[in-house]
Image (tube, rainbow, N blue to C red):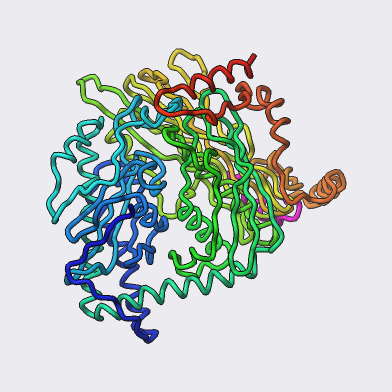
Amino acid sequence: MPAKLIETKPRPFKRVSIDPITLDIIENAMLNARWEMDAVLFRTAMSPGIREQHDEFPMIANVDGKMVVGQFGSFIYGFKAAYDGTIEEGDMFLTTDPYSCNGAVSHANDWLLLRPIFKDGRLIAYASMFGHMTDIGGKVPGSMPTDAQSIFEEGIRVPPTKIFKKDVLQEDILELILHNCRMPQWNRSDFHAIVAAIRTAEKRVIEMSNRFGDDVFYSALEDLLDRNKRAMAHLINTTVPKKKQYFEDYLCDDGMGMGPYKIRCAMWREGEKVIFDFEGTDPQSIGSVNFYLNEEMFKMFCGVYMIMVFDPQIMFNDGFYDLMEVRIPEGTLLKPREPAALSCRTHALGRIFDILGGLLGQGSPDFLTAAGFSDSPHLMYSGRRKNGEWYQLYQIGFGGIPGKPSGDGPDGHSLWPSFTNVPNEFLESYFPLRIETYETIPDSGGAGLHRGGNALRVGYRFLEPGQISIHDDRWLTYPWGVNGGEPGLRSRKTLYRKNGEVELLPSKCDRIQVEEGDLLHFDTWGGGGWGDPLKRPAEQVQFDVEAGLVTIDGARRYGVVIREDLTVDEKATASLRSRMAKKRGKTQLFDFGGSVEELKKRCKKETGMEPPNTPVFLSGFSGPSGTGKKKAARKGKKAAA
């Protein structure tokens, strides 16, 4: 049974006409309330993941649960469809389990809180926010084991639960949850910070409704949703062809020695509606790289991408969702069956944006964007200081943003629009480490008319013994270039031991013991290039060399000859570009750096790592008994043999 709404004074809203000035005032008031939610959270939370990096996503939605303002799209539809209780005034809900809320959150570290906003006994809106908790228990610090084979290994899961009833906190439930976490003080603070942010949104919504009247407020939200739908309908009709477009990309591995894993999507238009079909995507993995992709969430991904590429002036909300249909086959990497592990889902999540770029740009190559949104790398570092105090770091790394039609990709930047880096001074003050290197890597961005953003290198000197975990991808496959642009550099993680030994670490690993004095170079990936690099003005390449973004040798990828005094040798440049153009021939729409088979053959020589084996899938997984896991393991042994 779906959720049952209980209103003490139910009365239907009346749709009324609103003048443009009033609509503009309400629109900006809603946006201000959304940003005020963030401000309250950042000043109250304790964990650096939320407080400093802003790993959280707020939302204010209408009475139907459609997001009007926010960042991550509406997850209320999936929540309400999965929850079979009542929704009453004074309630606030908590859930962390993707399988219990139709993927409204995609891994158990994300704590989603939802508040129905009532006024005079009837529902007028929803406010919601979820944030990533540093730890929720499980088999490894950080609760995201790279070798998990079921979600039961990934920490405590909370089904949709009334954490507040009649505005009273259910403290026994909260204490039970916190008892299962390694950092209960951080989780408690972050939980109450999210509650405070949601209550701030509630206060602002009621103020608006009191000022303008319930019917005007309700109608304004509907108008904002309708306006978005009209704008997106125009974008879809002008940019999405009726003929099917296909694109596929790969996760490099699953952290258990198997890969790569294919994600495939087809796109076409039927009337005003665009269809996305993920038929052909690989079956779910035996490892934890599965991504439970909620269909509404994918619509949000697609809408944000289209708006940012084609028309950034459009206000983003959920009004356009009826214009999209998303088909994700059950039992695949993007819709795994319970209890498949999900803790490494960030790699597939990031890869979805690259796939959208490849799909949406084929029909309009001038708007095509290269790859580089590819991932969201994590570093975890934990242990006990000499005084016995527990420390635990969770940090998100940034890579190179791809080259785009309008210009170069930013260097060492987050794929998420509101994320920021953790200041090095903060890290060194609160954790036993020293940041010895923080720089972009020259030549790591793909060459192109518009250069791909350079990768980021962070050098962590560990000052206490402990353990680290790494989550990353794009070490085997390249962030591809487009319209003649070249691929970006792949990621790499190197550990320099105090005793002089050098270890090349896998992109996904846990429980790596580090000692005082060890140094980790955490190198991310570069963005793919856009357009013919031989057409990039020589003076721009010269500037890149002077700025340290491109080396003198790297300038030759653009056909530009730079002298030792950093001036351009124009005659040698013209000659080199002529030879390179003749040898290369016609530029290609995509440059993947080679097929998957070719990359696996060249893997050891190019990356220093062994190539992954053919994946073992969970198609026969039968549930918590583990029968399917044993069958899959036997298949894996046969395949390896």
Q: Could you say which quadrant of the image residue 40 lies in?
A: bottom left
Q: Residue furthest front?
A: 1
Residue sitting at 64 percent across and 52 percent down? 266
74 vs 290, left or right, is: left
Residue 603 magenta? no
Which residues fall within the magenta stretch?
A: 533-549
Q: Could you say which quadrant of the image residue 243 lies in?
A: bottom right
560 vs 200, left or right, is: right
Q: Above or below — where is 443 with respect to 193?
A: above
Please identify the quadrant where the C terminus is shown.
top right
206 vs 587, left or right, is: left
Can I make out residue 493 in this image?
A: no
Residue sitting at 20 percent across and 59 percent down? 88
Magenta part mainly helix, strand or loop?
helix
Residue 537 magenta? yes
Q: Position of residue 477 (x, y in %)?
A: 63, 36
Can I make out residue 489 in this image?
A: yes
Q: Position of residue 432 (x, y in %)?
A: 31, 28
Residue sitting at 49 percent across and 49 percent down? 415
Q: Nearer the viewer, residue 7 or 37?
A: 7
Q: Position of residue 182 (x, y in %)?
A: 25, 30
Q: Above or below — where is 498 with respect to 3?
A: above
Residue sitting at 64 percent across and 60 percent down? 405
Q: Position of residue 402 (x, y in %)?
A: 59, 50
351 vs 4, left or right, is: right
Q: Nearer the viewer, residue 56 or 468?
A: 56
Q: Nearer the viewer, residue 550 or 336?
A: 336
Q: Above or below — where is 180 with respect to 515?
A: below
